[in-house]
Amino acid sequence: MSKKATGKIGVLLVNLGTPDSPSTPDVRKYLREFLLDKRVIDINAVARYALINGVIAPFRAPKSAKIYKELWTERGSPLLYHGLDLQKKLQASLGDRYHVAFGMRYQSPSIKAALEELREQSVDRIIVLPLFPQYASASTGSVQDKVMEIVKDWWVIPNISFISSFCDDPGFIKSFAELGKQHMAKDDYDFVVFSYHGVPERHVLKGSDKGYCQLGACCNTYNKRNKYCYRASCYATSRLLAAELGLREDQYMVAFQSRLGKDPWLTPYTDFILKDLPAKGIKKVLAYSPAFVADCLETTIEVGEEFKEMFLEAGGEKWQLVESLNSEPMWVEAVKEMVLQH
Ligand SMILES: C=CC1=C(C)c2cc3[nH]c(cc4nc(cc5[nH]c(cc1n2)c(C)c5CCC(=O)O)C(CCC(=O)O)=C4C)c(C)c3C=C
Ligand SMILES: [Fe+2]
Ligand SMILES: [Fe+2]
């Protein structure tokens, strides 16, 4: 009797990317690659190059380099070492039938090198998991774009599938809720802020299914029509986390951070709303950053330090960041389950 040939399954974990070092030239190199991506800055190529060369490279890069220096540790950038830790632990948990590789959309290790590593292992098929819970063209879409650009040149193209969104994945929600509960067990909080990385409103409207998403009540449910709407996905994650944490609707809020440029981005802006909270009697806030599954500049510095300072200055008493999932055992098991179920 013939035995069906079954080889290894490749798993490719991808995160956004980070500079190779916090020096200004390395940060500039990173920002250039990142912001020249037409899925990130979706304006015409001439204007995009002018923006990068005229503003980002000379002015933004040295400012960002200062912040990266604060973030940097002995192991380097957290986004990178948490990714490598997750890769190792997931490999150990999945065992020999799988080969787990890790790549970054920008800078290193590259997606190309990670895909070559999988090719070297003669994998039968590849499951790509962009490490962004909520689908956005600027994050998940860009990873999909890059993977396809690379494999289209291979002579033999393996079966490739993408886990494009996991904003409502039970393991993701449970693991993140557990981290919040640990803080709630140690102190009483008045309020929870779910602060997501923002995107320009235009990005959401461009991805809208035949005009379904209008930046309003359309995001109050998560359904077939808005499955890939970033805003709807952020609200879906928040509702599920709130339910798991036992929060009433008046005990939490969804907001968006990290605007760039003058176009309207998703509102409300976190840095605006947090200043109004103390006057409403909200003095102790637990802050989640659920657009990220690894700590990085956006969580540790922006939410954990900058927003904290603003909140305390506005009369707040405590602002506590819920650290990210990183390579927490519950999260490793949740990722394993996503891969096995896929
Ligand atoms: C959640 C996923 C992300 C989306 C969506 C996203 C969109 C997006 N980002 C910028 C501009 C910047 N983002 C920066 C940092 C950064 N962004 C993400 C993820 C998403 N971005 C991560 C994980 C990080 C942190 C990386 C790290 O090294 O720790 C930065 C650089 C930092 C800075 O200079 O402030 C910029 C710039 C745009 C324009 C955009 C969508 C249009
Ligand atoms: Fe970003
Ligand atoms: Fe919507």
Image (spheres, helix red, strand yellow):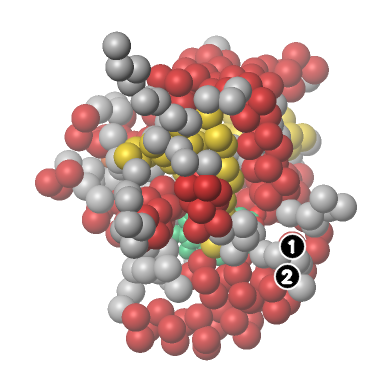
**9 up-or-down from 148: above or below:** above
| Residue 292 shows in the view | no
**Could you tell me the amino acid type at mark 2?**
Ala
Is 15 left, or right, of 296 in this rendering?
left
Kindly identify which residue carries mark 1.
68
Dot 2: what SS? Answer: helix
Q: In the image, residue 212 lies at what x, y percent?
A: 17, 41
**Quadrant location, the C terminus:** top left
* Mark 1: secondary structure: helix
Please identify the quarter of the rendering in which residue 235 is found.
top left
* Camera-nearest residue between 220 and 61: 61
Q: Return the x and y of residue 53 as percentages of the image width and height.
A: 52, 86
Q: Residue at x 40, y 79 (%)?
A: 48
Residue designated by label 2: 65
Mark 2, ligand 1, within 8 Å: the answer is no
- Which residue corresponds to the image point at 40% horizontal and 35% vertical from the top-left? 124
Q: Residue furthest right?
A: 74
Q: Is 309 located above or below residue 42 in the figure?
A: above
Residue at the image point whose x is 74% and y is 62% from the top: 68
Q: Which residue lies at the image location 40% right of the left edge and 25% below the top edge?
A: 6
Vertical relation: 327 (above or below) 267: above
Residue 166 in picture, x, y percent from top left: 43, 31
User: What's the amino acid at mark 1?
Assistant: Tyr
Q: Crowding near pointer 1: few (<14 within 10 Å), some, many (20+)?
A: many
Q: Nearer the viewer, residue 189 or 179?
A: 179
Q: Is residue 104 left or right of residue 232?
A: right
The answer to the question of whether label 1 and label 2 lie on touching residues, with beta carbons closer than 8 A, is yes
The answer as to whether callout 1 falls within 8 Å of ligand 1 is yes
* Closer to the camera in the image, 238 or 141: 141
